[in-house]
Structure formats: C-alpha cells, structure tokens
Image (cartoon, rainbow, N blue to C red):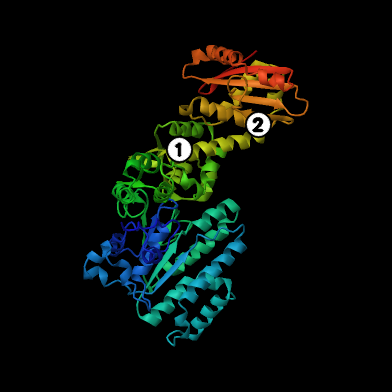
Amino acid sequence: MAELKAIPMGIEDFKTIIDKKCYFVDKTLMIKDLIDSRAMVTLFTRPRRFGKTLNMSMICRYFEKTDEDNSYLFRGLKISETGTEYLEYMGKYPVISVSLKSMKQPNFEMAFSEFKKLIANEVWRHNEILNSESIMPSQLEKLNLICRGTAENSDYYTSLKLLSDCLFEVYGEKVIILIDEYDVPLENAYFRGFYEQMTDLVRSVFESALKTNFSLEFAVLTGCLRISKESIFTGLNNLKVNSVRSGEFSEYFGFTEKEVESLAKYYSIENKMPDIKKWYDGYRFGITEIYNPWSVLNYIQNEIAISDSPPEPYWSNTSSNSIIHKLVTESDETTREMIEELVNGSSITVPIHEDIVYSDIDVNTEQIWSFLLLTGYLKQISTELRNNIIYITVMIPNLEIKSIYQRTILQWFREKTNSNSRDELFNALVSRNTQAVEDIICDWLDETISFYDEKEQYYHGFLTGLFSGFKGYSLKSNRESGDGRPDLLILERKRRKTAIIIEIKADKDFLKLDDLCNQALNQIEINRYESELVQEGYSDIIKYGIAFCKKSCKVKSK
C-alpha cells in the first residue's frame, strides 16, 4: 500500500509542498483566470488562513524568470492542461514578491524598520542586477544603500518602483509585483495608535509602484479588507477588487465541498464529513460554498493521529480577534441584541460597506458588520439594495465560529465584571438579601450578551464569571458534595465559617421561575450538599436556588 501524502500544515511555499510531495489541493487554474482577466492591479480580500499566501507563492513560481526551470512544479496540475497560450507565460517575467504580514511592531519607527528589512531582502533576492551595466549609477547607488539599510527614508517610499524599473531595464520584460497581506500593518497601526503614519507609508509605496508605473506588467495584492480608496488607493484607477462577495476567483481561496470530499476519501475518513461540514463549512464566496482550509487540514491531521478526535476551533488560534473584541466591549444595546440573535442561530440584515475606513469604527457602529463579514466571522445569505446602500442578510457560518463568539463574549464579561466593584453583590449574598442579589444579577444580564441555546450551561458560566474573585473566598464549580454535585460553591478560605451553595435552573417560560427556584432548593436538601461542608467545619451555610429565563432571573434562599 502506497504511503499517504503528508498534510502540509503551516507550509505556505508552493515549491516546498510539491518538492516534499505533500497533499496539494490544486488551485492552479487561478493562474489562467488571472491571465484572462487582463487586470493591471487585482486586490483579493479573504479571511486569514484561507490560502492567500500559498496562492501568491504559486503565482510567483509560475511567472518568475529564474536560472532554475520550475516547470516541473506544475507537471500534472490543472494549469498544465490549458495549452501553449497559457504555458508560454511560465518563467517569463521578473517578479517582486513582498509580504507585509510581519509588520506588527508596537510603534511606527519599529514597523518602518521592519519594512526596510523586507525591501532590502527583496532587492538582495535579485542581487544579480547589482552587477548589471544596464542600471544607471544613481539607481545602483540607491539599491546598494537599500540593501545596507542606510538609504534615505524617502527612498523606501519609492523602493518598489525603483526595483521594478531596474528589473525591467536588465531583463527587458515588464515586472509582476506581488504584495501579500498588505493590510496587516494598517490594522496593527490602528490598534497601536499610529494609523496615519502607516497610511502615509503604504499609500506612497502603492502610488509609486502601482500607479502609472510603465515597468509594471500586472500586480496582485492580498489582504483581509479593502481599505478605503481615500486613505490608501488614492487615484489608483486600475484597481480591481475581488472580495468574498465577488463571483470571479471564488473557488481559489478555501476548499470547495468537492475538494474536502476528495481529502476525506484520500485519508479514509469519509464518515467524518458530517462533523467537518458542521464545524468548518458554511462560508460563501460569491456563489461558491467554501470550507475553512486551515481548520479542515488541522482536523484531518488530528484524525489521522488519533482516531475519532473531536472537532476543535483551530482557526481561533490563528486569527486576530481584536475587531470582534472591540465590537463586544464597545457595543450599544441594539448591537448586543443583534449579536444575541446571531449566536442563537438567527440571521440578521445589516448594511455592508466594502470600503473600510478604520477611523470610522469609532463614529459609525454599522462598520463593524462589514468587518465581521469580510474577515470570516459571518456568512452572507442574500443581498438587496435599499436607497443605494447594500444590505446583506448574514449568519454565523459554523460551529467553529460560534464557539469563538461564545468564548470571546464570556471573556469580555469576566473582564467587565472584574473591572467593576462587586462589594454590593457580595454583601447581598452573605446577608441573604435575595431581592438585592436578584436585582444585581438582572442588571448584569441586561449588559452582557446571552446565548440561550446552552440553557443551564450558559448561565452556569455566567455566574462563574460573576461570583469568582471575591476577596477571601474561593469558587468551586460542580464539586463533589453529599450525594451529588452542586452547581457552585463559594467558600470562605481562612476561617472556614461561611459557605454558599448555589443550584441553577433555566427554562423558556417566565412563569416557571418561582417553581424552578423551589426545585433547586429541594435538590440541595435531597442530595445533602451541605453534609460534606459541615464535616469541613463550615457553620454558616447559605443555600440559593437561582432560576433563569433569557435576561430575567429569580433568586430564593434557604
């Protein structure tokens, strides 16, 4: 039996995947479509970890003129069957390839220093031109200064234009420019407080390299978002944007259902397709159904190593959650209610603006829905035009993304509760003031975001976050006691005098809350939850039954 191909986890270089004979999901027809499009500058916006970098590497390997013959890399792949009119482009052009994904420094000076290194490395990658007599002495001097990191700052703003001119002069062929993850430094700068400086840098680089550059054959850019023309792509009339809403190129980022089925069949896990679909499917790019490729590959790799591995939210470990965190922490009541609808499985209809302006987030809360859709936290269902504004009906795409919302929301709630004084809540608990406990819990319920499909499990987590961290007390969750497990125990640590037992119930009927509290208190008695606490020396034992229905609760004590 032939050995199975390895899963190329974390490998973003096309050549490495082919040379190491890893499993490759063939996206090479993207090259044909790129040639057919005849666009001068194409921007692809897709969520993180959906194959943008690998595709850029594939494009580079196909078009780049090198001393090595790279045609073997594409042997047997779909592009090799398209005929000579496309194969004649292979190895024809000098290529400038730069990724900005490493520009995440805490201030502009450090980020600009990283940019200088990226440009120096790309010039050095083409170091053969430094010995060419085709280049003017002034150009050669600037290239050498860039390589040494000692050029004037202004020279770095036009460095890609300079390099493309020199390559054109040496090789006699116009240049392809590839810029991967162009918006990473912009998002980082926004959250770090130097957005205007970074915008000036990126705008200047793009204007010189992509606008009226007679040495340019074509350019491809990738990112998660399309930053507004006014802030980045000023005057760039030759820009063609391909987003998650576009029909063209829709199958080239992420895996189609047929590709996932082929993967599952190759690794003999066809029976896992229902789990893979529930957890990692659900995206729609254009009219194409798409699976998250990073998560699918992680799941298959784990399934190969340990059979029947449960699905996990792999994507949450790789994708920045800064935007969704900002949404939750700064949301108004209307936005919170809309998020609740999403988390509870409903769809919402919201205005979408594909031209993103980071500075607008603080003054226009509607912008956040565009961020969530374009960065992979929502899926589009349908589109309509109202008064020249695009409205899209959206949902959470799958269980993986739903779990991210839930964990992020609970974490936000813990942060918020920890940042507010809870002395009033603690005093109410130890003094058996049930009305005050009830009022305070309802106030917190009103300010946070609930997902009711989890029933008691959600409210258990809610109270765990609310009751944790009382000074001098420890919180135990589902601890063995008596003949069962109480939901929560709040225990005095040093004197071991006061212990609070809490049993939680939940229902969809408001009228049942009183009876549920009584059931919870009876459960504490029947299961003798206090017996072990008495043996441990606790003399003041307080018992609470707390019942929930959506954002209402009832509290009783015994």
Does residue 84 appear to the left or right of 6 in the view shown? left
Query: Where the N terminus falls, by quadrant?
Result: bottom left
Label 2 residue SS: loop
Furthest residue in direction bottom, as rendered? 133
> Is residue 113 in view from this perspective?
yes
Q: In the picture provided, is 114 more to the left or to the right than 312?
A: right
**Residue 279 screen position, x and y as percent:** 40, 41
**Foreground of the two, 7 or 517:** 7
Q: Residue furthest right?
A: 495
Amino acid type, label 1: Lys
Q: Amino acid at mark 2?
A: Ser
* Residue 527, x across and y down, in percent: 59, 16
Query: Distance between the Cα atoms at labels 2 and 1?
Result: 25 Å
Q: Which residue is mark 1?
A: 402
Location of residue 104 with respect to 414 vertically, above or below: below
Q: Position of residue 357 (x, y in %)?
A: 49, 50
Percent from the top left, x then y, of residue 408? 53, 39
Front-most of residues 273 and 37 = 273
The answer to whether mark 2 and mark 1 are in CB contact below 8 A is no
Which residue, as the protein is rendered here, is positioned at the far front?
A: 1
**Exactly how many numbered labels are in the figure?**
2
Crowd rating for badge 1 (residues with CA inside 10 Å; few <14, some 14–19, many 20+): many
Q: Helix or strand or loop: what does disc 1 sit on?
A: helix
Q: Which residue is mark 2?
A: 468
As drawn, is 203 to the left or to the right of 87? right
Judging depth in this view, the residue of 197 and 305 nearest the camera is 305
